Amino acid sequence: MPIPELQQIVEAVRVKQRFVIASHARPDGDSIGSQLAAAYALRALGKQVTVVNADPAPPPLMQFPGVPDIQITHRVRVEPGEDAAVIVMECGDLARTGVAGLERFFVINIDHHPGNTSFGQLNWFDDTAAACGELVFDLVAALGVPLSHEIAIHVYLAILTDTGSFHYSGISPRTFDICRQALEAGVDPVLVARNVYDSNNMGRLKLFGGVLSAMQIDPTGRIAIVYLDHEMARQAGGTYEDTEGLVNLPLTVKEIQAVVFFKQNEGDEYRVSLRSKGDIDIGSVAKEFGGGGHKNAAGCTVTGPIDALQKLFIEKIERAIVLVESQDCRIAGLQK
Ligand code: 5GP
Ligand code: MN
């Protein structure tokens, strides 16, 4: 079935010549994969493409094609004009990019997060996609660009990382169909997984050790609270970038239903990562604190004394868990 938003984007890509492709600050595998798959496709059409991000890619992703060439900047350096457009991947609003000056361009917004604000001149938003990379896959096909090895690797990277190695909700038959096509285009899934997950430094492992030893569990035994500050990172010999993926580990314990990870920014300001299992809507918890994300993976930034913050988050998460339990009871009741 033709998607009107996609057709409009294809038309815009045809008429424009210069592109800036941006994503959110602290980019993840889906940001990088979506940006670079699109960049390689547009270059195959002879377009001039600049990929920009506010922050560098996580170190393991540096090994993927084109990643070291991403421009790291807080202000776009490309001049706007009639022939230019910005494609923003993975952002609910333009501020999420952390890159100033994008609003002066014709903006194409491609995203799969619930609550996207339709900030672009063209907006294509599909929250049934497991990764933004799924949408980029469709864009590449709609542009008539063959699935090159580089494009396929980046689409696969986006899906692998954003589904948490095929753990999270949102995975559909389509997800596997795209992965199948990526493998047919030459992607080696073992090599990708090894590059993404098995190329860490020792500091990261020590940091994981330190943070997990200090982990707390709420009185109900269902919520894990993890915490990291600059001093802990220094002692372990790791950096904040090394914490990528750490928030998911407590969920490997059967009883743990949700995780909240506080990472100190400066003073009393904390970056919060939230994760949950099943129907527990952690995204709505993040939204209450001015953040956002998906049902099972979300984040926000908060300020205050850490003890009070922890208490507040546990209360809200507890409420989200109870909500699902009461729904489960109702469904069980109906079935009787
Ligand atoms: P992470 O915990 O890995 O930083 O983020 C998990 C998910 O939540 C990602 O899909 C990310 O896009 C979303 N997210 C994280 N922080 C924020 C935030 O401050 N605002 C919004 N809108 N989404 C966020
Ligand atoms: Mn994503």
Image: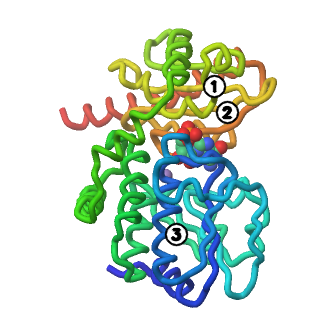
Give the residue at the far right of this rendering. 267
Q: CA distance from mark 3 to mark 2?
A: 30 Å
The residue wearing badge 2 is: 271
CA neighbours of label 3 inside 10 A, class few (<14), some (14 to 19), many (20+): many
Q: Report the side of 1 relative to 250 (left or right).
A: left
Q: Residue furthest left?
A: 336
Above or below, comparing residue 121 to residue 294 in the picture: below
Give the residue number, with chain letter if any, for mark 3: 39
Of label 1 and label 2, which has the lower sequence position?
A: 1
> Is any atom of residue 159 visible in this view?
yes
Label 1, label 3: how far apart the Cα atoms are: 34 Å
Q: Secondary structure at mark 3?
A: helix
Determine which quarter of the picture holds residue 315: top right
Task: Tell me if the residue at label 2 has its CB under 8 Å from ligand 1.
Answer: yes
Provide the secondary structure element on which disc 2 rests. strand
Residue bearing the label numbered 1: 262
Q: Quadrant of the N terminus?
A: bottom left
